[in-house]
Image (cartoon, grey):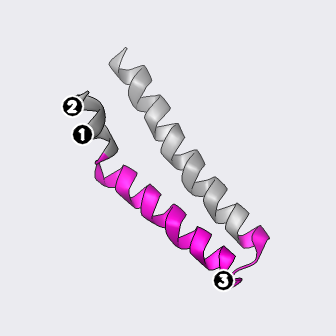
Amino acid sequence: MKNRLDKLLSIKSLVTLAMTVVFCTLALRQSISGQEFLTVFTTVIAFYFGTQTIRSADHS
Protein backbone atom coordinates (compact mmCIF):
# COMPACT_ATOMS: atom_id res chain seq x y z
CA MET A 1 0.00 0.00 0.00
CA LYS A 2 2.83 2.41 0.86
CA ASN A 3 4.48 1.68 -2.48
CA ARG A 4 1.29 2.73 -4.31
CA LEU A 5 1.12 5.92 -2.27
CA ASP A 6 4.76 6.70 -3.08
CA LYS A 7 4.07 6.22 -6.78
CA LEU A 8 0.98 8.43 -6.60
CA LEU A 9 2.97 11.21 -4.98
CA SER A 10 5.76 11.16 -7.54
CA ILE A 11 6.53 14.45 -9.26
CA LYS A 12 5.21 13.21 -12.60
CA SER A 13 1.90 12.20 -11.02
CA LEU A 14 1.55 15.49 -9.19
CA VAL A 15 2.26 17.47 -12.36
CA THR A 16 -0.28 15.41 -14.29
CA LEU A 17 -2.93 15.94 -11.62
CA ALA A 18 -2.17 19.66 -11.35
CA MET A 19 -2.37 20.14 -15.10
CA THR A 20 -5.65 18.25 -15.20
CA VAL A 21 -7.14 20.51 -12.52
CA VAL A 22 -5.85 23.69 -14.20
CA PHE A 23 -7.14 22.78 -17.65
CA CYS A 24 -10.50 21.64 -16.26
CA THR A 25 -10.81 24.98 -14.49
CA LEU A 26 -9.88 26.91 -17.63
CA ALA A 27 -12.39 24.93 -19.67
CA LEU A 28 -15.17 25.49 -17.14
CA ARG A 29 -14.43 29.23 -17.10
CA GLN A 30 -14.46 29.12 -20.90
CA SER A 31 -10.95 30.59 -21.02
CA ILE A 32 -10.00 27.87 -23.49
CA SER A 33 -12.11 26.05 -26.03
CA GLY A 34 -13.19 22.46 -25.66
CA GLN A 35 -10.90 21.49 -28.53
CA GLU A 36 -7.87 23.08 -26.88
CA PHE A 37 -8.70 21.31 -23.62
CA LEU A 38 -9.08 17.97 -25.37
CA THR A 39 -5.77 18.35 -27.21
CA VAL A 40 -3.76 19.24 -24.10
CA PHE A 41 -5.50 16.76 -21.82
CA THR A 42 -5.10 13.89 -24.28
CA THR A 43 -1.41 14.65 -24.70
CA VAL A 44 -0.77 14.81 -20.96
CA ILE A 45 -2.70 11.63 -20.19
CA ALA A 46 -1.13 9.73 -23.11
CA PHE A 47 2.34 10.74 -21.92
CA TYR A 48 1.59 9.78 -18.33
CA PHE A 49 0.14 6.36 -19.13
CA GLY A 50 2.72 5.73 -21.85
CA THR A 51 5.60 6.23 -19.45
CA GLN A 52 3.83 4.12 -16.81
CA THR A 53 3.44 1.28 -19.32
CA ILE A 54 7.09 1.48 -20.38
CA ARG A 55 8.22 1.52 -16.75
CA SER A 56 6.05 -1.54 -15.97
CA ALA A 57 7.49 -3.42 -18.96
CA ASP A 58 11.05 -2.60 -17.90
CA HIS A 59 10.50 -4.02 -14.43
CA SER A 60 9.07 -7.30 -15.74
Q: What residue type is disc 2 on?
A: Lys
Q: Which mark is residue 29?
A: 3
Task: State whether residue 30 is above or below residue 19.
Answer: below
* Numbered disc in front, either 2 or 1: 2
Residue, disc 1: 6
Estimate how packed mark 2 is, as few (under 14), some (14 to 19) or many (20 or more) residues with alpha carbons within 10 Å: few
State which region is magenta: 9-36
> Badge 1 local density, few (<14 within 10 Å), some, or many (20+)?
few
Whole-Å distance between the Cαs marked 3 and 2?
37 Å
In the displayed structure, would residue 59 be above or below residue 7? above
> Which residue position holds label 2?
2
- Most extreme residue toward the top, as rendered? 60
Query: How far separated are the C-alphas under marks 2 and 1?
Result: 6 Å
Residue at 59%, 46% in the rendered image: 46
What element does badge 2 sit on? helix
Left or right of residue 47: residue 38: right
- 22 sits to left or right of 15: right
Q: Is residue 46 found inside the magenta-colored segment of the image?
A: no
The image shows residue 54 at horizontal and vertical percentages of 46, 30
Looking at the picture, how far across and down is residue 1, in whole percent? Answer: 26, 27
Identity of the residue drawn at 53% across and 39% down: 50
**Viewer-nearest residue: 54 or 40:** 40
Choose the circle earlier in sequence order: 3 or 2: 2
Question: Which amino acid does the dot numbered 3 rest on?
Answer: Arg
Label 3 residue SS: loop
